Image (cartoon, rainbow, N blue to C red):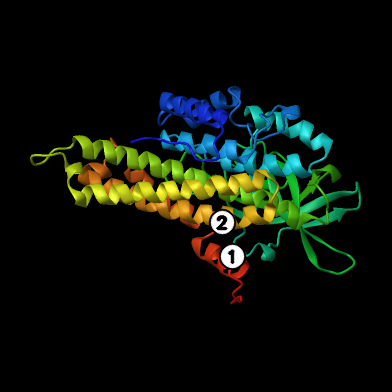
Amino acid sequence: MTTTHTPTDTPERVALRAAVAALGKGHGRADTQSLWAEAGKLGYLGINLPEEYGGGGGGIAELSIVLEELGAAGCPLLMLVVSPAICGTVIARFGTEEQKTRWLPGLADGSLTMAFGITEPDAGSNSHRITTTARRDGKNNGWVLSGRKVFISGVDIADATLIVGRTEDARTGKLKPCLFIVPRETPGFSYHHIPMEIAAQERQFELVLDDVRLPADALVGDEDAGLLQLFAGLNPERIMTAAFALGMGRYALAKAVDYARTRQVWKEPIGAHQAIAHPLAQAHIELELARLMMAKAAYLYDAGDDAGAGEAANMAKYAAGEAAVRAVDQAVHTLGGNGLTAEYGLARLITAARVARIAPVSREMILNFISHQTLGLPKSY
């Protein structure tokens, strides 16, 4: 099965794909920490971050290639979605010079990691209902942050978490979203593991912020531009989730195709039978279509078209999630009983593939977005 590049891939990106694929194949289903460290040394983790802060000077297009190819090799790095793509992007675009100097070089080489805290128990997909609140600390002109977050990836290994809170506007009484960098050891910041039925090395946590006192420079960007800054991080998140799903789907499909070529029950290998071959061909087509939409979304985002990227990123995430679930399902089915064994490593993907349908935003909310924003249909909520 060929692995082709997309029409937006430059010669440099083609070479990047090949190099990252080789790195992934060398590790396989290896320890995440060792792969993360090596990818950082090679410059892959910060390939989207500015060169003046130790990054590669590329964009989300390059970073999505890194995640997709590692996933296709069977060793995706989930924190790529969070640390350089969301947190690194937000700090690079809106952070102060001090924040950029403090965090970006470490995020780029992998020596520092940052988690992202937005989801709350009672807010769900409605980010406007976030209740984590930041109020001014009269003692030092800093902030006091209070609230809860759930399903936050990698907090135990992250040096800090970029927390989405809301500040109270004294003039209007309304609440506005703002972003704060909270180091892991900050007093009042605690986290608790949420047991998950997902075979992933990156764990999920509930966060509790109990009157967490932060200095004034913990705020990222403008206090009055929270929505702009928030969505500047969410579009890369959707693009990178698509890359995560596509890598997983490609990995599963490659396993199934190899098995179908060689597994012989009657006279011919099972891949000669259309009942096996056609569903695998359909899975390949759907993955390739999703890759093209992801490439479009990354192109628009890197070109500065946030509105266009928002539509494309949501569609790419939707398409990739659906394609990955179907590819994994068909791969397991192709292998039959072997598809459920630990030896072939596909059964663990049955649960993992569904993550891309659910997080960071459900497919139903994406359909709402497209129906309202693209098609101009009225809202039901």
Of residues 344 and 161, the one drawn nearer to the viewer in this rendering = 344
Seen at 83% across and 35% down, the residue is 97
Say if 14 sits above or below 268 in the image.
above
**What kind of element bears circle 1?**
helix
Q: Which mark is residue 369?
A: 1
Q: Position of residue 104 (x, y in %)?
A: 72, 33
User: Is residue 225 visible from the viewing direction of this image?
Assistant: yes
Residue 136 % position (x, y): 86, 54
Task: Kindly tell me whether residue 352 is visible in this rendering.
Answer: no
The residue under the point 60% across, 45% down is 298
Determine whether label 1 and label 2 are within 8 Å by CB.
Answer: yes
User: Which quadrant of the view contains residue 346?
Assistant: top left
Residue sitting farthest toward the left: 267
In the displayed image of the protein, which residue is found farthest to the front?
A: 7
Q: Nearer the viewer, residue 80 or 321?
A: 321
Residues under labels 1 and 2: Cα distance? Answer: 8 Å
Quadrant in the picture for the C terminus: bottom right
- Give the residue drawn at x 27%, y 36%: 258
Q: Position of residue 50 (x, y in %)?
A: 72, 32
Left or right of 149, for residue 70: left
Q: Is residue 76 left or right of residue 298?
A: left
Residue type at numbered disc 1: Phe
The amino acid pointed to by label 2 is Asn
Residue in view at x 39 percent, y 41 percent: 250
Q: Is residue 47 above or below residue 60?
A: above
Mark toward the start of the polypeptide (1 vs 2): 2
How packed is label 1: few (under 14 Cα within 10 Å), some, or many (20 or more)? some
Which residue occupies the foreground of this view, 265 or 104?
A: 265
Where in the figure is residue 266, as x and y percent of width and height? 8, 41
Q: Residues within 10 Å of mark 2 (few under 14, many from 20)?
A: many
Q: Which residue is mark 2?
A: 314
Which image quadrant: the N terminus? top left
